[in-house]
Image (tube, rainbow, N blue to C red):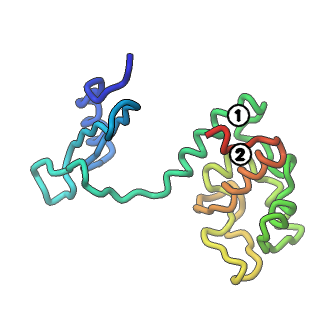
Amino acid sequence: MRPTLTNIDVSKVKATMKDADILGVSIAYVDQHAVSPICMTLGRVDSESTAPNVMSDTPFAAASLSKPVFTYLILTLLPELGWSLDTKLNDIYPFDAFCRECGFLWAATPDNSARAGQFTVGMALSHQTGLPVTYSNNDGPFSFEFEPATAFGYSRIPVYYLQKVLEHGKGIDLEARS
């Protein structure tokens, strides 16, 4: 059955919105034969409104969507690779080599090298590596903000490292897979 917006169970969407405290949504389906997306809107823009006022052109604040797409790609590749979320990345492509290749300055002390040796696929995808949120070589060598797997802290470095592990350690071209 070809998906269309008429196949969407609006009552389920509304129930999910209520459970997750989501005020408004815009749902779009892009048909390969249509000139523009088919859209459906539900809800309100802000908590002050009582009438539905989300329109097809209502802007929504959104974070980077590349990371959820990347995570989905990785999760679908795990069985093919023979990996799990606990696969150690450093065993496939050393973190030191990654930093050298990418020109990242990092404090490669024995303690930090041991921390980097703990990185797993799951830690990289769930931002639990302890690496800094922001980083610039102008700031000097980066170090850990917390011990791996003990807290959450968004960082782009481990996601990029996981990409490089796949490309260098496994010879996978992610551009061809997406």
Q: Tag 1: Cα neighbours inside 10 Å, few (<14), some, or many (≥20)?
A: some
Q: Give above or below for 68 relative to 62.
A: above
Callout 2: SS: helix
Give the amino acid type for the residue marked by disc 2 in the picture: Val
Image coordinates of residue 115 in percent, x first then y, are 80, 60
Camera-side residue of 149 and 116: 116
Above or below: residue 45 compared with residue 92 = below
Q: Which mark is residue 121?
A: 2
- x%, y% of residue 54? 20, 50
Q: Count how many numbered circles sit on residues in the image.
A: 2
According to the picture, the residue beneath numbered tag 1 turns out to be: 78
Q: For the view shown, which residue lies furthest in the left direction?
A: 51
Q: Residue at x 29, y 48 (%)?
A: 21
Tell me what residue is drawn at x 71 percent, y 50 percent.
Answer: 163
Name the secondary structure under disc 1. Answer: helix
Q: Are marks 2 and 1 in contact (CB under 8 Å)?
A: yes
- Residue 136, numbered label: none
Q: Is residue 98 above or below residue 26?
A: below
Q: Earlier in the sequence, mark 2 or mark 1?
A: 1
Q: Using the image, determine if residue 138 lies above or below residue 46.
A: below
**Is 52 on the left-hand or right-hand side of 89?**
left
x then y, percent, for residue 50: 10, 52
Image quadrant where one finds the C terminus = top right
- Comparing 50 with 66, the one in front is 66
Q: Nearer the viewer, residue 24 or 21?
A: 24
Could you tell whether 97 is left or right of 66 in the image? right
Task: List x then y, in percent, for residue 9.
Answer: 27, 27
